[in-house]
Image (spheres, rainbow, N blue to C red):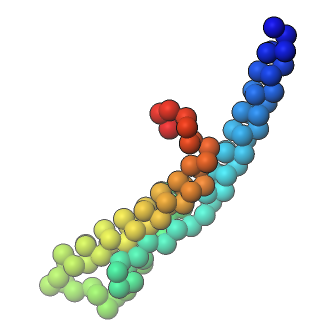
Amino acid sequence: MMRGMGNMQGMMKQMQKMQKEMVKEQEALHQKEFLGESTNGYVKATFTGNKQLKDLAINEAIVDAEDIDMLQDMVIMAINDGIAKIEKETEQTMGKYTKGIPGL
């Protein structure tokens, strides 16, 4: 009966250690910058790892008052690209912690 308790304590210590590592990695991920771009690179959206838009750069060569739709499409493309990059890296970084845990 007592042997089981020691094992449980060891498991709890391991979980706490893993949780600390997970928090550290998540914080590092949030510090990183991700660059999303439209297909031609005319619009660039810079995000932090926690999906905050930090900067949006639009090349003036594509600013055309007659064609606002194209500009809007490129901005959306750059933003979606940046978010996709964050999600991919988040999955690669944090996935090892959430594998096999239901609901995560």
Residue 21 place in picture, x, y as percent: 72, 45
Viewer-side residue, 88 vs 30: 88
Q: Is residue 84 left or right of residue 90?
A: left
Q: Is residue 31 left or right of residue 3?
A: left
Residue 14 place in picture, x, y as percent: 76, 34
Does 67 appear above or below 56? below
Given the current orientation, which residue lies at the most extreme bottom position? 61
Q: Quadrant of the N terminus?
A: top right
Residue name at image x 85 percent, y 10 percent: 2
Residue 90 found in image quarter = bottom right
Given the current orientation, which residue lies at the most extreme left position? 66
Residue 52 place in picture, x, y as percent: 48, 58
Residue name at image x 41 percent, y 76 percent: 37
Does 11 appear above or below 90? above
Q: Is residue 57 left or right of residue 89?
A: left
Residue 22 place in picture, x, y as percent: 67, 45
Residue name at image x 84 percent, y 19 percent: 6
Residue name at image x 17 percent, y 82 percent: 67
Residue 81 found in image quarter = bottom left
**Do we see residue 53 in this rendering?**
no
Given the current orientation, which residue lies at the most extreme top position? 1
